[in-house]
Each structure stands twice: as C-alpha cells, then as structure tokens.
Image (cartoon, rainbow, N blue to C red):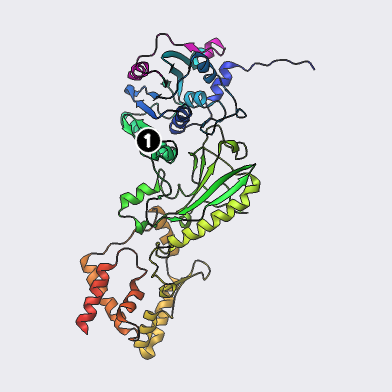
Amino acid sequence: MRTIEIVPSASALLQSLRGLGYSPETALADLIDNSIAAGASAISVDLDWNGGEPIARVLDDGCGMDAEALVRAMCFGGNGPDGERAETDLGRFGLGLKTASLSQCRQLSVVTRKAGVTSALAWDVDEVIARRRWDALVLDPLPPSDQVIILEAGDNGTLVQWERMDSIGGLSGLDRDAFFLRVRDIGDHLGMVFHRFLSGDARRIGISLNGRAVRGWDPFQRAHPATITMQSEPVRHAGKIFTVMPYVLPHRDRFNNDAEYEAAGGPGGWGERQGFYVYRGRRLLVPGGWLGLGGTRAWTRDEASRLARIAVDLPVGLDADWRIDVRKSQARPPGRLRPRLTVIAGLCRDRAREVFAWRGSRAKGQLRQARSQDDIWAAGFGSARYRIKRDHPAVRAVSEALGGKGALVEGLLALIERSVPVERIWLDVSEAEGAATPSFSAAEIAQLALQLAAVVSAMPASTPLEERLDQLIRHLPGDMSALRIAVLHNLKAAS
C-alpha cells in the first residue's frame, strides 16, 4: 500500500499544545514529577515577579542528562503513554515538560548536568513560528542566574527555566501583591500533591518555594485522634492489586481552634476537598470529588459528606484503565470497578453523615457514653421535618409537672417542630463551611444552669441526679464542663 507522510505544521501544532489547560500549579507539579523520576532529593522552585515580567525556575539535584538524553527529553511525545515505565517514573505521555512549560511561557530553557558535563537546549515559540520547523535552540552561553551557578558547582542536576510568560498562563499580568498571593496558592497545591513525599510516606524529598520549605498537607488528618480510619479494601484489576482506604475526618467541634479546622480543610476548603483522592505512584492526581459515582444520580459535593475522604493508591501500570489525562489532574475508574467503589464510598458517606449530624459524639471510639435514647430530636419524618421526642425524660418531666395543662406543652412542641427554619439553617451552615461550636459567656452559663437545674429537679428521682443532667447536656456541642459544674452547684444549693 502506498503511503504519504504528512508532517504537522510545527508552528500551528505548538501553539495548539499550549492550550491544554494547565494552571501554574499543575504545570509546576509536572516538572517536579520529572525531578522525582530523576532521583532528586532536593527540588527548589523559584518564582520571580521580575517587575511584572515573571520568570520561573525549577532546580533539582537529580541524576541529570547527557546531551543525547536531553534531546530525547525535549522531543514532543518522548516514549509515549505505552512506553515501559518504572514504578518511580511519574511521567505519562512524554509531553509534560514541554506542554506544561509552554502553557505558561514562550521560552522554555533546560540546563542539565551529568557527570560534570553541562548540556542546554531551549524551545522558543516565536522561533518555531518564524522558522516553521521543530528547531530547538542550543544555549551558548548559558542563561545567567544564581541557579545556573549552583548547578555548575555540582556534578549532576537539572534546571528548567520559564521566560516571556504571556496571557495564556496564569502568572503574567499580575501586580506584585496578586503575584505573591498566587505563589502562596501554588505552595499549598504542591504541599497537597506531594504530601506523601514530603512526609516520608514515599521516598522522602524536600521542596522549597522561593527559599521556604513546602509543608505537606495530609488530607486524611491521620494524626488527629478523632479521625476514623475505616477498613481498607484491596481491589484487583487487570492483574494488579491496589488499595482503597476510607477515612471520616473529625467534626469541627473536635479541632482545638478555627485555624486548625481551616487548615485541615485544605486548599479550596472542606466542601471542595471531600471524596476520592486518587494517587499514582504515591503522587496525588485527584484531590477530592466523587468520580461520577453514586448510581443513576451521581453524587455531588454536599455538606453531609464533607468529612468523607477516600484514598485510592494506584500503581503506574493502570494509567489507561483509569483514563488519566495529560495534565495528570483527572482520572475515571473503569466501568467494572464502579459498583464496588460505589459501595465503599457509600459506607464512608454514611459514617461521615452520622459524624456531621451528631458533631462526632457517635463516632466510633469517641464519647461512647453518648446514647441514642438521650437524643431529644428525632429526624426522618419527610420534607426535612424533625420531631421532638415526647418520651424524652425532660419532656415527660415538664408535661407531668404541668398536670392537666400538658396540652400546652404539646401545642408548643408541635409549633416548634413545624417552624424549624431548615433551609435557612442549611444555607447558614453551607456559607460558614460547617456549623461553628457556640461559645457561652459566664452570664449565659449562669442563666442556662438555673434553667437546666429546674428541669433536672423535675425529672424522676429514681434516676441518679448526675445521670439526669447528662441526659440533658450529653449532645450539646462543645465543652460543657463549665455548664455541668454550674448546674450541679445550683442543684446542691437548692437541696
């Protein structure tokens, strides 16, 4: 069969590849993938505002490349997605270095050093357009920078430099303050994506951003004593086994302060970060979301599931099955795995809903003394209605104390039940990213203590006094120790 070679237009294709949709943080993460694959232990990211003409540099102490290897690395496509890759190789399509970089700038320079020998090449978008050829530039002399000096002082390593950033990227056109706010966001993103490398859960590396160490952010808050670690699930697919590990994070009440709670929410906040965390080679690809699971009606990010987070640890060899994209920021589970993943996630969401609704008081291993019979509210009566339990000891005591006027209590409770502003409460909680733990002033504690002491006194004396009090305050949010002491003081003073 006769064939005709059709060579793509260098200028047109290169400009098209620039529009793949990288953000600055996802592009820099792609460069760090290459540094990790090169065995680097220290990676320095420097983002220089440069008077409104930003320059980005990523320097690592990895194995570096000789001249031939550098040419292969600068070739669009490289080994491609079907090439053999080591378990430590975080590459995917052979495009990352080029497309990630040129999505942000018009000139990409790579200076690399192997066994004391330096090689340097650059892609210049304007030169390719002018020449209409895939002509890379041989850099001689080397671009001047402190990073080049550091590189030249060692035997091995690689420096990637972005220059002439334009509007297609996300760092150009910003004033100084806006630029450094984006730098902060980038640091948070890198701390999330590479948290397992930064913590030593994978091969330990150090990443610095503008001279400051990037701190890893653990999405699962495994060091927090109130985090629930559910049973891990080994899953076999395509001859490989990977692990699914569900977690339910602590309720807001279980954090020491608002700053700790906000930090645990992660980049984007609690609502954004719920769901699946898909890792490939221990590098985070998908930081939350429900992967289109949930049956006929796909789950969405909602308040009740905000505490549910599920780790999926994929080996490198399942890229195609999970449809991992060029930017390594999206993944979709294979069809045959969706039912099982739905079941696992459903159980995690149910547990998270319980912790969210009861402020963690029913979480496994947490406050075991809390009992369902002490709840004063009962839910599940259609149209988001909630009912006050008429058989709760406090409700019974008040009704009996009124004797023949118990109908007054019934009428008041019915009015309260039918006027709970459910939609307004939901809106307020959503806007505040969770219900805040109320704090009481000394005057409020004193007043409430008098009111509760009267109710406790009316409850059946056959139940010990302290147990009666616990039936009232056991499910109140926050630390009720001061209130408990005040109520007991009032009861003893009245006896």
Q: Position of residue 12 (x, y in %)?
A: 58, 19
Q: Which residue is mark 1?
A: 187
Q: Would you say residue 146 sits in the magenta stretch?
A: yes
405 to the left or right of 288: left
195 to the left or right of 342: left
Q: Residue furthest top?
A: 140
Which of 170/123 is in front? Answer: 123
Q: Residue furthest right?
A: 1
Q: Quadrant of the C terminus?
A: bottom left
Which of 252/302 is in front? Answer: 252
Please, is residue 310 above or below residue 365 in the view?
Answer: above
Q: Position of residue 293 (x, y in %)?
A: 58, 50
Residue at left offset 56%, top offset 26%: 94
Residue at left offset 35%, top offset 31%: 208
Q: Position of residue 292 (x, y in %)?
A: 58, 48
Q: Quadrant of the N terminus?
A: top right
Q: Which residues are magenta?
A: 128-155
Please, is residue 436 above or below residue 368 in the view?
Answer: above
* Residue 354 visible here: yes
Q: Position of residue 179 (x, y in %)?
A: 35, 30
